[in-house]
Amino acid sequence: MDASAVTEDPPFLSTAGANPNFLHIDTTIPTWVESRGTPIAGISTDFDSDTRNVTTPDIGADEMNGTCMSTSNSTTQSACDTYTWTMNGATYTTTGTYNYVVGCHTETLDLTINTAATPTGASNQVINGGVASDVTIEDIVVSGTGIVWYPTALDAANATNPIAAGTQLVDGATYYAVSVNGSCTSAALAVTVTVVLGNATFDFTELNYYPNPVIDKITMKYNKKITSIQIFDLTGRMVQTIQPNSETAEINFSKLSSAMYIMKLQSEDGKQAEIRIVKN
């Protein structure tokens, strides 16, 4: 059956051949005749020699400016970064509701655009540990959503050979971090690590710090004097340093922007520690 066919008793003004309104449609009554035809090559006028609409002609003998019977269809779609709608060929980059109207028919697209931002962090990082097993992939500090690490840029681009949790770091190696948001993946952030061993670490069973996340002040407690505290942002820039020389220290975060920070600690016995602090 013809895709443009409809079933209707058309609202003719007259069906009497002698009437001047013979086979003309009543334009005040909604009808399936209006704008539901299919263009036919070589047919450009109706029986009154009125010009046919070239894309959505009326069905039947009479081309008129009538009242159509409206129809609609809605499609829900999600995509990563961009989406091209086949209905109109338009490419969208933002979430929204879009309409495309042809004649009396409206297509609606409810579109969700998801993105995965490239992780942020210092491209060169020094990772300290007492022995090789102390320094693992989790010690590289980056910020992002659903971080996955890869051994090469090609692996990151193809999402192949992800690095398993607990993998020991190799001095001088470059690792590639990708953010994952649903089915969307970001471009990779390359981080080259320098592994420094032989630095004894804090006894973390004796180290307490709270609250984390922090709004204004965070308290650090250890069983030995904390001689140095350095705070770095994820670009590697030092933003604050103090020398408490006390087993208890209070650090003021109130002037720092909301973000993740790395706090490097050193105790009186030369041991070191790095912890991640979130500022809300």
Image: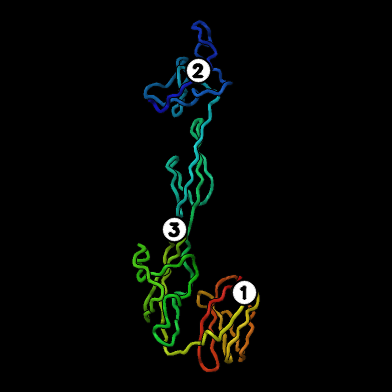
Q: Which residue is mark 1?
A: 214
Please state if 248 lies on the left or on the right of 137 as rendered. right
Please name the amino acid that badge 1 sits on. Val
Q: CA distance from mark 3 to mark 1?
A: 30 Å
Residue 260 vertical position relative to residue 251 in the rendered view, above or below: above
Residue 172 vertical position relative to residue 2 in the rendered view, above or below: below
* Secondary structure state at the residue bearing disc 1: loop
Q: CA distance from mark 1 to mark 2?
A: 73 Å
* Secondary structure state at the residue bearing disc 2: loop
Residue 188 vertical position relative to residue 38 in the rendered view, above or below: below
**In the foreground, 25 or 65:** 25
Disc 3 versus disc 2: nearer the observer: 2
Please state if 116 lies on the left or on the right of 206 as rendered. left
- Residue 234 in picture, x, y percent from top left: 51, 74
* Secondary structure state at the residue bearing disc 3: strand
Q: Please tell me which residue is depicted at 51% across the width and 87% down the height of the picture.
A: 203
Q: Residues within 10 Å of mark 2 (few under 14, many from 20)?
A: few
Q: CA distance from mark 3 to mark 2?
A: 52 Å
Q: Which residue is mark 2?
A: 9
